[in-house]
Image (cartoon, helix red, strand yellow):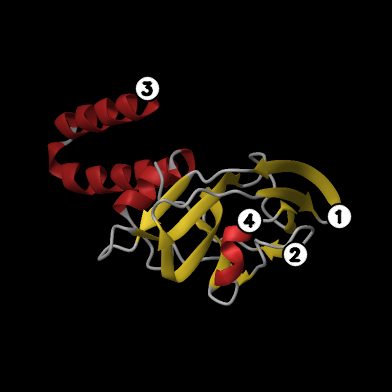
């Protein structure tokens, strides 16, 4: 509703002051885009996509097959958006793959517990592009940043394998955990 109001306001101003209309329009459009960036970053980034938007903020070896395996990562996201925790496999994995493990994903601000998520299925898989019978990426969980709508500094995530996915053991040398901006709507 605010966006519609601003557009009507801009059009009204353009009719009132035609001599300066282009300059005013550009100024108001800039203000609208900056406000839009904070209210709806996904749509803003759809229009103005930074070259590193989808570059993982974490990319690391991770033993998804090993019960009890745990790693903690410091998060330093550059963008407000939805992020995914998942894995990538260079050679791919069959498109019939179903995640048979269970992960506990715990978020902290410093040493203060914020919340946890349990992941026991995948939320999205992306095929190899040239080979639709294999997935190159499997997303296991989604979270919003800033965390809980307000925490953006000194954020840590601890990822623990509660139940290992034994299907992934043969791929242990080529599988990588990643955390990155989600391409999902």
Q: Please indicate whether residue 43 sits to the left or right of residue 97 in the image.
A: left
Which of discs 3 and 4 lies nearer the camera? The answer is 4
Which of discs 1 and 2 lies nearer the camera? The answer is 2
Q: Earlier in the sequence, mark 3 or mark 4?
A: 3
Q: Are marks 1 and 3 in contact (CB under 8 Å)?
A: no
Where does residue 139 sit, x and y in percent of width and height? Answer: 51, 52
The span from disc 4 to disc 1 (Cα, nearest Å) is 29 Å
Q: Please indicate whether residue 57 sits to the left or right of residue 32 in the image.
A: right
- Residue located 85% across and 49% down the image: 112
Q: Judging from the image, what secondary structure is the residue with disc 4 in?
A: loop
The span from disc 1 to disc 3 (Cα, nearest Å) is 40 Å
Q: Residues within 10 Å of mark 1 (few under 14, many from 20)?
A: few
Q: Earlier in the sequence, mark 1 or mark 3?
A: 3
Q: Earlier in the sequence, mark 4 or mark 2?
A: 2
Q: Earlier in the sequence, mark 3 or mark 2?
A: 3
Q: Mark 1 = which residue?
A: 111
The circle on residue 7 is: none
Q: Earlier in the sequence, mark 1 or mark 2?
A: 2
| Quadrant hosting residue 160 | bottom right
């Amino acid at each position: 509703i605010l966006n519609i109001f601003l557009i009507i306001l801009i059009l009204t101003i353009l009719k009132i002051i035609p001599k300066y209309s282009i300059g005013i329009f550009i100024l108001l459009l800039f203000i609208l885009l900056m406000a839009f960036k904070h209210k709806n970053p996904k749509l803003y980034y759809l229009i103005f996509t930074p070259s590193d938007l989808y570059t993982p903020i974490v990319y690391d070896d991770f033993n998804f097959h090993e019960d009890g395996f745990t790693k903690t990562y410091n998060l330093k996201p550059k963008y407000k958006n939805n992020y995914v925790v998942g894995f990538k496999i260079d050679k791919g994995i069959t498109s019939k793959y179903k995640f048979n493990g269970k992960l506990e994903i715990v978020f902290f601000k410093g040493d203060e517990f914020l919340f946890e998520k349990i992941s026991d299925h995948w939320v999205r898989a992306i095929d190899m592009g040239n080979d639709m019978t294999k997935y190159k990426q499997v997303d296991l969980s989604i979270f919003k940043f800033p965390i809980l709508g307000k925490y953006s500094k000194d954020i840590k995530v601890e990822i623990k394998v509660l139940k290992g996915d034994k299907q992934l053991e043969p791929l242990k040398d080529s599988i990588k955990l990643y955390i990155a901006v989600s391409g999902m709507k």
